[in-house]
């Protein structure tokens, strides 16, 4: 009996895999959108312009103090009233990107603030342009300082895709709900869904850790590695 139940659920395995791929695609695109929005909003929050600071603050406060499910409904159900019709996947991706972007705004803002003022003053003395300072001085250090928080928000986008089942997006939770309605095998159906979320979460974390090791090596550690890997004169002579 138990074996039969598992065979019944595993017959939907291709649907689960397609749902996992879709969830991963939404996660990547949604996070990239969130990062772009957050970068602009963080710069606006630190801007000298009172109007930009006000607009960015309104965005952050409005998004962080309203439910993400409501935001998904607004993008999917309300925008058509203004002539903007989006597919469920597109609407869900945009809603998640806008939502996480508000949280990333404060993360990036903290990263920018963590860069020492002495470095900025030194860059100004050297005559570097504001764009050069931002890209070559501020951005690398800010990203290094807040990288763990960025990864956490990436995982939150992945977990947030489960809410898109409310607008009929066939991601993991949506597929599991349909399969459960057909089979009524709650434990097996949602057990597979949990396993897929865990695999994707740990997979993204592993990739992010690899990116961190490759991208954020300090110059000192690189020089130390070169010195230890280079053969010494004594070793060569012996």
Image: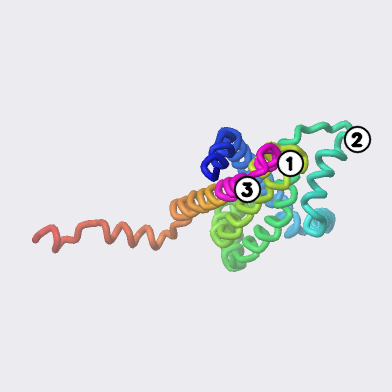
Write down the residue under mark 2: 81
Residue bearing the label numbered 1 = 92
Q: Residues within 10 Å of mark 2 (few under 14, many from 20)?
A: few
Residue 78 on image: x %, y %: 87, 40
User: Is disc 2 placed on a helix, strand or loop?
Assistant: helix
Indicate the quadrant where residue 1 lies.
top right
* Label located before the other in sequence (3 or 1): 1
Question: Is residue 127 visible to us here?
Answer: no
Q: Which range of residues does the magenta coloring cover? A: 176-196
Q: How far apart are labels 2 and 1 at the CA level?
A: 17 Å
- Residue placed at 70% from the left, 56% from the top? 105
Query: From the image, which quarter does the C terminus lie in?
Result: bottom left
- Distance, label 2 to label 3, CA atoms, is 36 Å
Residue at 57%, 56% (x, y): give it.
Answer: 143
Mark 2 or 3, nearer chain start: 2
Instruction: Please provide percent x and percent y for residue 19.
Output: 62, 38
Q: Are marks 3 and 1 in contact (CB under 8 Å)?
A: no
Specify the farthest residue to the right: 81
């Amino acid at each position: 009996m138990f074996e039969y139940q598992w065979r019944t659920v595993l017959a939907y395995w291709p649907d689960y895999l397609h749902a996992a791929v879709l969830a991963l695609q939404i996660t990547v695109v949604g996070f990239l959108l969130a990062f772009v929005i957050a970068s602009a909003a963080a710069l606006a929050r630190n801007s000298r312009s009172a109007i930009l600071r006000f607009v960015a603050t309104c965005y952050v406060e409005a998004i962080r103090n309203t439910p993400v499910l409501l935001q998904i409904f607004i993008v999917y159900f309300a925008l058509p009233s203004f002539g903007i019709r989006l597919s469920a996947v597109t609407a869900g991706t945009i809603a998640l990107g806008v939502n996480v972007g508000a949280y990333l705004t404060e993360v990036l803002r903290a990263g920018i603030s963590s860069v020492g003022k002495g470095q900025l003053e030194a860059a100004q003395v050297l005559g570097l342009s504001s764009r050069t300072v931002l890209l070559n001085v501020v951005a690398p250090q800010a990203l290094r300082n807040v990288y763990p928080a960025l990864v956490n928000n990436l995982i939150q986008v992945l977990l947030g895709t489960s809410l898109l089942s409310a607008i009929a997006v066939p991601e993991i939770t949506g597929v599991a709900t349909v399969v459960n309605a057909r089979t009524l095998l709650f434990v097996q159906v949602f057990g597979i869904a949990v396993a897929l979320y865990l695999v994707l979460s740990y997979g993204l974390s592993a990739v992010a850790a690899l990116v961190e090791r490759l991208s954020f090596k300090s110059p000192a550690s690189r020089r130390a590695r070169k010195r230890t890997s280079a053969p010494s004169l004594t070793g060569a002579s012996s």
